Image: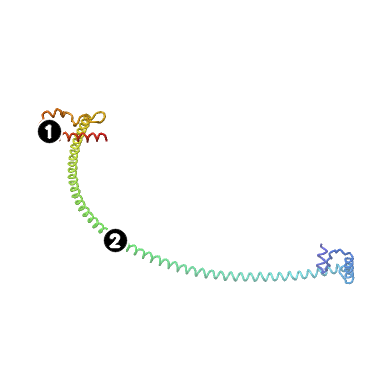
Amino acid sequence: MAEKKFRSWVGFKEEAVAAPTENAVERIRQLETQLADLRSRRDITSLSKEEFEILAGETAMSLIKTAQQRESRALAAAEQTVAETARITKERLDSSEAKAKSILSGAESRGRKYIEAAESDAIELREKAIRQAEQLLLESKREAAALGGAAKREAERIISEATGEISEFRSWLTSAISESERLYRLQTQSLNAAEQAIGETRNRLKQAFERLAALQGDIDANIDENDRPVEKTFVRKGAKRPEEAKKPEAKKPAAKKTAKKTVKKAVKKSTTKKRK
């Protein structure tokens, strides 16, 4: 590996080895051509040991000299670059410092101006706010006084109206109470009259039911078991038989006939009602 590097450093170039092919004859011909080429030219491999050492020493010296020259040039360029960068940085630092000082001084002056302007504005605003607050306080006091007076007048008006309404309500209430008492008396009187009428109607109904019961008893007494009249005339309980009534009334036959007819009609009506 070191030999290859040295050969490449000296300038010897190796030929690339051809890839083997399937045809052996072609491979042999390629090798023969390569050998002929090496024999035809004077290569580094044909040098002797002393010649090779001399060539290597001269080459090394030339390389060292060129390397030293390159190093000195690089050092000079680096020193020059460092000096230039130092100068540029110093100039830029100085300029930036000067700019910063000028900016700082300008900012301080502007800040002082702004502070003074802000202080003056704040004082003006404070005075303006104080004046506005005083004006608002005076206006609110006036409005409060006006509202208090209006509220007092309104309260007095409401009180007077309320007293009038209360007196009217009292008079209306007394009239309503008297009217309700009068209506109560009328209702009690009407209720008493209604109670009396109900009692009278009850008595009348009782008498009517008693009469109906007596009539039913008379009807039952004048009808036999087959619902046929027992006598030819309807006889009430406690009344006389028609045979007994004929004896004193012999002189009046017409009246008897009419009485018999009426009795017969009544008996017929009662029998028909009972059958129904």
Q: Position of residue 263 (x, y in %)?
A: 18, 34
Amino acid type indicated by mark 1? Pro
Mark 2 or mark 1: name the one nearer the start of the chain. Answer: 2
- Which quadrant of the figure has residue 199? top left
Task: Characterize the local packing of mark 1: few (<14), some (14-19) or many (20 or more) Cα atoms within 10 angstroms.
Answer: few
User: Residue shown at 24%/57% (left/top)?
Assistant: 154
190 vs 205, nearest the viewer: 205
The residue that label 2 is drawn on is 143
User: Residue shown at 12%/33% (left/top)?
Assistant: 253
Q: Is residue 214 left or right of residue 132?
A: left
On-image quarter of the C terminus: top left
- Classify mark 1: helix, strand or loop: helix
205 vs 118, nearest the viewer: 205
Tell me the tag on residue 253: 1
Q: Is residue 59 left or right of residue 109?
A: right
On-image quarter of the N terminus: bottom right
Amino acid type indicated by mark 2? Glu
User: Residue shown at 29%/61% (left/top)?
Assistant: 143
> Residue most toward the left?
251
Q: Position of residue 145 (x, y in %)?
A: 27, 59
Q: Where is residue 146 in the image (x, y as percent from the top left)?
A: 27, 60
Residue 251 vs 177, above or below: the answer is above
